[in-house]
Amino acid sequence: MSINLPSNIQVAQRVHAIEPFRVMEMVKAAGEMRRSGIDVISMSVGEPDFTAPDIVAHAAMEAIKGGITQYTDSLGLRELREAISGHYASVHGLDIDPRRIVVTAGASAGLLLACAALVAEGDEVLMPDPCYPCNRHFVSSFGGKPVLVPASAEDRYQLSGAHVAANWNDRTRGVLVASPSNPTGTSMTPEQLRAMLAAVRERGGFAIIDEIYQGLSYDHQPVSALAIDEEVITVNSFSKYFSMTGWRLGWLVVPELLVPTFEKLAQNLFICAPTVAQQAALACFTPEALGIYEERRREFQRRRDFLVPALRELGFKVPVMPDGAFYVYADISALPHAQANDSTAFCWSVLKEAHVAIVPGDDFGFAAPSRHVRFSYATKLERIEEALGRLRRLLGR
């Protein structure tokens, strides 16, 4: 898209390094079809179909009614930081000092703060390919160079210690990984995480670990990177497990020595995270809310357990079972379809002919994106079943 500006205004060069977010083009096209009366099933957007439970919404309304809407401390409400600390203790058995917790305006703001603090002009940051596209753009925005390392199904599509050793050079400063991952839904095993962090630590680098989907883990108890190395920076969010996407609230856990750095950046870049959202989030840790979230987690698992075998039956290759988040990263190369070697064309065909919205692999990196598509199962099971029926008809299965 061209931008018409007065002749004396130039867009900063960093903008040109940021590619369009193609999933949003698919979402926009699906929306236009819906407005024209077509029933489109969305399996594209990474957003839970659940919203905040009533107890959380009620807490927000009470804050507004009570006039509790002014700025908070830049690091976040003390009570919320203590509640998050308590959550680490109950879920992971970790004793995290609340002073190390930085409440942010969503996980995106947390990643921006981490890159602002750690990435200098020309620094290289390793991340797996495929990965969430905005992660590499966060690095680019601060003058860094994201280095995408092809990761295979054998690696669970994750960065390994061997990858770090093979790709580290004089310009490398650290790694940015997500576990569970978008788009693959796969987590690092504890052994894989330990080996990767050890390889980074040996080289004096930083590790930023995105754990925003960790609450949505299905086959095992998730292991936070903080249980392995207290010097890592972890990113988390109220968007996914806690069903608060539009509330824009997340948090970081940072090493104690870096707290003043992050506080200074937060004060200047964001002032604070949304106050009403912080007040509402306190209710997320009540027994009532946690019971609701656990039932929702089990519902996501039911959807996964239906979708993956059904896709494999249709001819999609899913070589590793996704164990978290709500994504399936599937290989289309063996499908009986004219566009089975072009995931973008395939996704547009699926949208226009079957009225199902899925996402091509182009957004997520450069390792065989034309062979891969991402399904999101953040929609009702009956709609997923209908989507599979439409795909079956499209593929002649």
Image: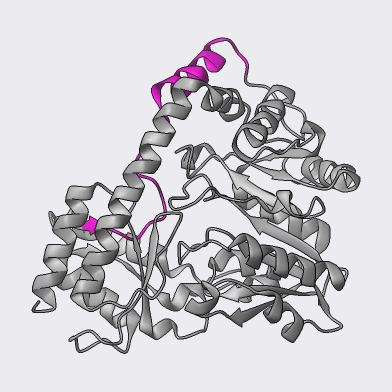
Task: Inspect the magenta stretch and tell me whether residue 165 lies in it.
Answer: no
Q: Quadrant of the C terminus?
A: bottom left
Does the rendering let one see residue 8?
Answer: no
Residue found at x 68% / y 65%: 176
Q: Give how far across and how far down residue 146 sits, in percent.
A: 68, 75
Task: Inspect the magenta stretch and tell me whether residue 65 lies in it.
Answer: yes
Q: Give how far across and how far down residue 364 sits, in percent.
A: 49, 73
In this rendering, would 124 be left or right of 56?
right
Nearer to the camera, 383 or 315: 315
State whether residue 114 is above or below residue 270. Answer: below
Instruction: State the extent of the magenta-drawn residues as a range.
Output: 41-68
Residue found at x 81% / y 34%: 99
Q: Give how far across and how far down residue 246 sits, in percent.
A: 48, 40
Residue found at x 45% / y 67%: 184
Q: Give how far across and how far down residue 142 sits, in percent.
A: 75, 66
Nearer to the camera, 264 or 146: 146
Nearer to the camera, 176 or 348: 176
Q: How is the image coloured?
A: one colour
Outermost top residue: 66
Nearer to the camera, 146 or 81: 81
